[in-house]
Image (tube, coloured by chain):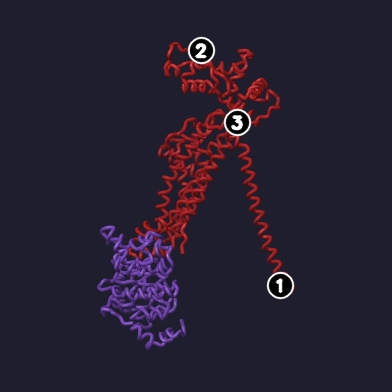
Chain colours: A purple, B red
Amino acid sequence: MRGNGTNMTKISAKNVNVFYGSKQALFDVSLDIMDKEVTALIGPSGCGKSTFLRCLNRMNDVIDICKVEGSIKMDELELNSRKLDVVRLRENVGMVFQKPNPFPKTIYENVSYGPTIHGMAQSKSELDQIVEMSLKKAALWEEVKDRLDEIGTGLSGGQQQRLCIARAISVSPEVILMDEPCSALDPIATAQIEELIDDLKKEHTIVIVTHSMSQAARVSQKTGFFHLGKLIEFGDTEKIFKNPDNQQTQDYITGRFG
Amino acid sequence: MNEAKRKLLNKRYRAEANFKLFGQIAIGLALLFLAVFMYKIFSKGYTAFQKTWIVTEVHYDKELMLIETDNPSLEDLENADYYDIANKAMTRLDPSLPEEDDRQLIQMVAFTYEQEVKNHLLKNPSLLGKIVPIRLTASDDLDQVHKGNYPRDIPEEDRRVNDYQLKIYDMLNERGDILSKFNLSFFTNPDSREAELAGIASSFMGTVFSILVCLAFSFPIAVLAAIYLEEFAPKNKFTDFIEVNINNLAAVPSIVFGLLGLGVLLAVFNLPRSTPLVGGITLSLMTLPTIIIAARASLKAVPPSIREAALAMGASNMQTTMHHTVPLSMPGTLSGTIIGLAQALGETAPLILIGMVAFVNTIPGTPVDPAASLPVQIYIWSESAERGFVEKVSACIMVLLGFLILMNLAAQIIRHKFERKWN
């Protein structure tokens, strides 16, 4: 799968250290995420890949004891700065979670929530349009167009996750973070989401954390392998999977540990 | 299977059977107590919902009423004298009775008989000059005799109803002139010194006003405190300290709050004594921690994934809380609130301290009018020596229990109807 990236760096992380209280979760992580590409982060459980992902939209702020050091730049904006307006940041960096978490509200309200709080639609018809566009991009429109006023949590797991993706792209973020988006889904729903990721990268930069190495190989252009809080190896997906430089990466990918 | 193993297995089965049996015994005992309690109250109280009337005839005689005009206006009727015709209405039951013994008959009806005679005419002015049947409220002693609550076989000098009155009663009863009807006045009358006239209207309204005041004070304060503590406050020693103290507040005996109401609301702020306003504020101190604890628990029960979803969409903390967390926690908060109010409903001690135990024979129209409350009314009536109040106490308990059951039912319905299943 070839990238259609612009070969421009979107996010550049330098020497990122993360601490939960006195426990260090990430050690000196530095990596560049390219614009309009899919970057996959793989590694065994507890390796820090989700922690790193949550640095990119400052979701770690929710955890009181979490402290982030180092520099993360998105374009020219320093993300790890006290002065950063996290509300503006999250408007630009959407997130899809491991477990589908639609709001217990209607399908329409789920998708229209972001545009509404960010004042993106001037009129009801404009809002309708955004909702329709987002659901179409998330490949959910055909399935739900006649029941937009039904509760989002009543959909199947795969549909719920696509609804969450529609919700995330409703505010046209530049970057979409996905934290193991398929781990709660069956293979068919997984395939749909993967197809969707391939489509979305035309307009969005995507960072995906995944446990499935085959998924990383299928959807991503760049892959980073984390182990025990360290970024062991980062590079083109093809290279990582076919000819990794590091023995640990080799062992993990071939299933010898992890 | 060897012998030891079989033994062990049998022992385990036996232990389970025994445990089940003990559980069933416990439930049986609880139900038995409840049944005895209910039977006691209902068997004593149901008669209070019946009222006894004596039917007689009254002659609206213009002369005796001292009306001089031919065409008296309503005002003339208002100012007329009803004493003689009311007395005559009673003495006509036994014309052979010497005049000096009139009181014997008059004591058989409530002391408001003159008023009742008057009201009857004011309602139908055309009855003037006619002899018409009228029903008068029986005295509480006769009422108790009619309901069979009064032993007739004790010596006459120990009885409040003498032999002559019993003879008249039996005669009237045989003629069908003793009526037993639904006791509407129990619900529409304020308290009275006379059992046959006493009703729960003033204490019922007092309770309603107290609960409304309590709700108005405690709900907003408690919900705001809970939201702040749960969603915004930093987690540190100071907030831990506050949490411990809220829990302590919930365990403080209610009479202490009564003293606080007396010392602060009445003595310092000079709020009107014996009013539902003061009662409600005092009760809200008790309800406050209950609602805070319920609201915090239901805020905690909202899964973090919903908060994360909203935050990740770029909602501010405030928006996340107001758009998502608080609406989702409302059913739990509301049912906790109703349970807190139901507790406040049955509270007696603090209300006695702030003076809501006073004898109130008016129906309060606002929260700043003096009033009693249902549990205090029970207390007041249970102290009365007259037999007529015994059934009133039970009846008042029934009304209070009905109120409580309704509120708990509402809490249950809210919980069931709006409870969300998190997947």
Q: Residue at x 71, y 67 (%)?
A: B10
Label 1 vs 3, first from the N-terminus: 1
Amino acid type for the residue under numbered disc 3: Gly
Q: Position of residue A104 (x, y in %)?
A: 41, 60
Q: Answer yes or no: do the residues labelled 3 and 2 have beta carbons within 8 Å?
A: no
Subunit bearing disc 2 = B
Q: Residue at x 39, y 72 (%)?
A: A179
| Residue B64, numbered circle | 2
Q: Above or below — where is B58 with respect to A95?
A: above
| Mark closer to the observer (2, 1) | 2
Few, some or many C-alpha atoms within 10 Å of disc 2 (few <14, some 14-19, many ≥20)?
A: some
Secondary structure at numbered mark 3: helix
Q: Answer yes or no: do the residues labelled 1 and 3 have beta carbons within 8 Å?
A: no
Amino acid type for the residue under numbered disc 2: Leu
Residue tagged by mark 3?
Answer: B388
Secondary structure at numbered mark 2: loop
Q: Position of residue A251 (x, y in %)?
A: 43, 86
Q: Quadrant of the N terminus of chain A?
A: bottom left
Label 2 vs 1, first from the N-terminus: 1
Q: Above or below — where is B232 with respect to A162?
A: above
Q: Are marks 2 and 1 on the same chain?
A: yes
Compare residues B409 and A54 and report the one nearer the observer: B409
Few, some or many C-alpha atoms within 10 Å of disc 1 (few <14, some 14-19, many ≥20)?
A: few
